[in-house]
Amino acid sequence: MDEYIKVPLEEALRVFVFLEKVHVLMHQPMHVKDLQYVENFAKENYPEIHALYYNIVWHWLPERAQHDIIER
């Protein structure tokens, strides 16, 4: 599937910054095992997760792809 979409740089950078935070969390096994650390991460980052999921990345997808996801 060699299909491409255009993504605003500002949004792509926002996703990258968030993924960097997730990488730091997952890269250190001691972080993942620390329930308080993971809970704090979730509390601090859920607003961004929600915004990226519903307001940014979803709108990058063509309607056909959105429909395929909904139908899964």
Image: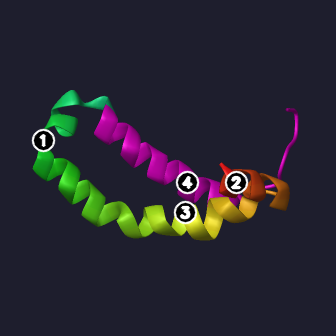
Residue labelled with disc 1: 34
Between circles 4 and 1, the one closer to the viewer is 1
Distance between the alpha carbons at the discs numbered 2 and 1: 36 Å
Q: Which stretch appears magenta? A: 1-26
Between circles 2 and 4, the one closer to the viewer is 2
Q: Whole-percent x and y of residue 53?
A: 55, 61
Q: Do the residues bearing badges 3 and 4 touch, measured as CB atoms within 8 Å? A: yes
Mark 2 or mark 1: name the one nearer the start of the chain: 1
Q: Specify the label residue 52 is tagged with.
A: 3
Q: Is residue 17 visible?
A: yes
Q: Main secondary structure of the magenta part?
A: helix
Residue labelled with disc 4: 15
The residue depicted at 70 percent of the width and 54 percent of the height is 71
Between circles 3 and 4, the one closer to the viewer is 3
Local SS, label 4: helix
Residue labelled with disc 2: 71
How many C-alpha atoms fall within 10 Å of the one at disc 4: few (<14), some, or many (≥20)? some
Q: Is residue 4 magenta?
A: yes
Mark 1 or mark 3: name the one nearer the start of the chain: 1
